[in-house]
Image: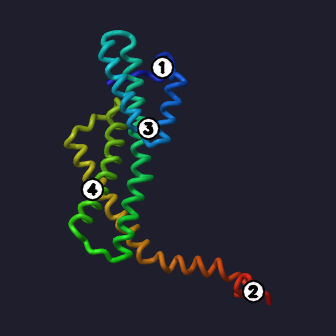
Amino acid sequence: MVYVEESEKKDLEIRIPKKLLFLRIFFSLIQLGRLFRNLEYMYYMVLSWKWKGTDLETRVRLRAMEEKRDACILGLVDGFLESAMQLLLQLYLAFHHNLPATFLRVVTLSLSLAGTSWIHTAFYRHSRNIDITKHKMGIRISFVYWLCVLAELSPRFLLLASFGAYFMPCLHKMTFNNIVIDDNGERKGEKT
């Protein structure tokens, strides 16, 4: 892994062309930003292998690590703004409508939870691996960490979904009463 002092980072920065910046924004808007950043990471890694032993190797390798970090951050945001919300909605509907736990439903919910947990683990693993002061996480340690994240997130998702399923009708009624009936106890729209 390449380690560079903060004072040297200014000299090693690579300028980003406007076309590349436009492509990043465009692909991010059509939900392919992570793929684009991973392709950039692979491109810079191939360049660093090509320029091995030269001054450009450090610059290009740093740029590759930045792209990989950005891809992990985009994955984390995507995972918790999309995948986690879909999992919560599926659990809410299963609890609210008392749907039977069929094999397909259990597998689908389990895989969704496993994927959400893996997104968090991948981000943590990459963040830890680029820090020179910490030991790198291998596959076995990543698997153990993933199991810990899975054990941490599972009850939270289940509790949020069950709370929503069992208490949401009461919350809707309370909200409806506050909107329809004003402070004097009279219905809005009626004249006294």
Task: Report the amino acid beneath label 1.
Answer: Ile
> Which circle, 4 or 2, is nearer the viewer?
2
Q: Earlier in the sequence, mark 1 or mark 4?
A: 1
Quarter of the figure with residue 39:
top left
Task: Report the amino acid beneath label 4.
Answer: Leu
Q: How crowded is mark 1: few (under 14 residues within 10 Å), some or many (20 or more)?
A: few
Quarter of the figure with residue 185:
bottom right
- The residue indicated by pointer 2 is 190
Point out residue 25 in the picture as x, y percentages from the top left corner. Answer: 51, 35
Q: Earlier in the sequence, mark 1 or mark 3?
A: 1
- The residue indicated by pointer 1 is 14
> Which circle, 1 or 3, is nearer the viewer?
3
Q: Are marks 4 and 3 in contact (CB under 8 Å)?
A: no
Residue at the far right in the pictured view: 192
Q: Which of 159 and 39 is in front in this view?
A: 39
Point out residue 142 in the picture as x, y percentages from the top left corner. Answer: 25, 44
Callout 1 secondary element: loop
Callout 3 secondary element: helix
Q: How crowded is mark 2: few (under 14 residues within 10 Å), some or many (20 or more)?
A: few
Callout 2 secondary element: loop
How far apart in space, not on screen, are marks 4 and 2 (Cα)?
53 Å
Identified at 40% across, 37% down, the residue is 71
Task: Report the amino acid beneath label 2.
Answer: Glu
Point out residue 36 in the picture as x, y percentages from the top left corner. Answer: 41, 33
User: Does residue 109 appear left or right of residue 96 in this picture?
Assistant: left
For residue 111, the mark is: 4
Task: Report the amino acid beneath label 3.
Answer: Gly
How far apart in space, not on screen, are marks 1 and 4 (Cα)?
39 Å
